[in-house]
Amino acid sequence: MAIEIELKFFLENPEKTIQALNEKAEPIKEDYQKDIYYLPVHRNFIEKKPVSEWLRIREAKNKSSINYKRWHNDKANAISCDEFETSIENIEHLKNILNRLDFKELIIVEKIRKNWKYKNTIISIDKITGLGHFIEIEIEKHEFEKIEKAKKYLYEILGELNLKLGKQDFEGYPYLLLKKKGLI
């Protein structure tokens, strides 16, 4: 298990942000990702507000994976979660297993993600089909004793990069898409 610590914001001017990141940070890669979110029959993840867990299969060019996240929602505006992820050798077999176990496909999130490295962080610009552009900053190697210290560090990095950001997102792409489609 890993603890994921991240901040995510709506991004109104992705071109300028990409230009600034190309000048100050190390580009890593660009990737297309298709995330399929599932609901188990025995527990409805979207019933609880805020949503505190997700089960996702990610299809990407070089690597497919299954991921379960349990968000730390003890306080409002949580930005950390316990994360369990592993590679998938045969994605179609896994989809068939989940379907036969009555896991229901909830929503698909498609995105083009561009990544950069900067001072122990990974910064991603996501173009989400149906939602627009977002920026996400995440601790690359979690070396902080407390989540609050990591969160403070992420805000310091954003300040150092002097990026113009929109409203912070605490709900996540699957929730935003479900809401937009009137399913929540």
Image: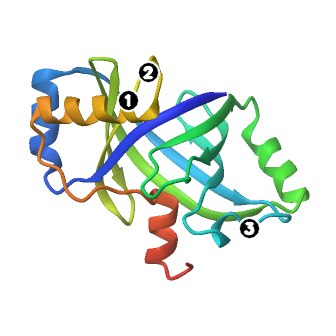
Marks 2 and 1 in Cβ contact (< 8 Å): yes
Task: Specify few, some or many for label 3: CA neighbours under 10 Å numbering under 14, 14-19, or 20 or more.
Answer: few
Dividing the picture into quadrants, the one containing residue 18 is top left
Look at mark 3 in the image and give the residue it sits on.
44
Residue at the spot 35% in from the left edge and 27% down from the top edge: 122
Count neighbours of disc 2 (C-alpha within 10 A) and say few if under 14, some if 14 to 19, many if 20 or more: few
The local secondary structure at tag 1 comes to helix
Q: How is the image coloured?
A: rainbow
Q: Find out whether the residues at labels 3 and 2 contact each other: C-beta distance under 8 Å.
A: no
Q: Nearer the viewer, mark 3 or mark 1?
A: 1
Name the image quarter holding the N terminus.
top right
Quadrant where the C terminus sits is bottom right
Bin the neighbour count of mark 1 within 10 Å (Cα to Cα): few under 14, some 14-19, many 20 and up. some
Local SS, label 3: loop
Of residue 127 and residue 151, the one placed in the foreground of this image is 151
Position of residue 5 measured from the top left corner of the image (x, y, whole percent): 45, 35
Can residue 118 be seen at all in this image of the molecule? yes
Relative height, residue 118 to residue 95 (above, below): above
Residue matched to label 1: 150
- Disc 3 vs disc 1: Cβ atoms closer than 8 Å? no
Disc 3/disc 2 C-alpha distance (Å): 33 Å
The image shows residue 75 at horizontal and vertical percentages of 49, 54
Q: CA distance from mark 2 to mark 1?
A: 6 Å
Disc 2 residue type (three-letter):
Phe
Q: Is residue 173 left or right of residue 100?
A: left
Report which residue position mark 2 lands on: 144
Asked which quadrant contains residue 52, the reply is: bottom right
Q: Residue at x 16, y 57 (%)?
A: 12
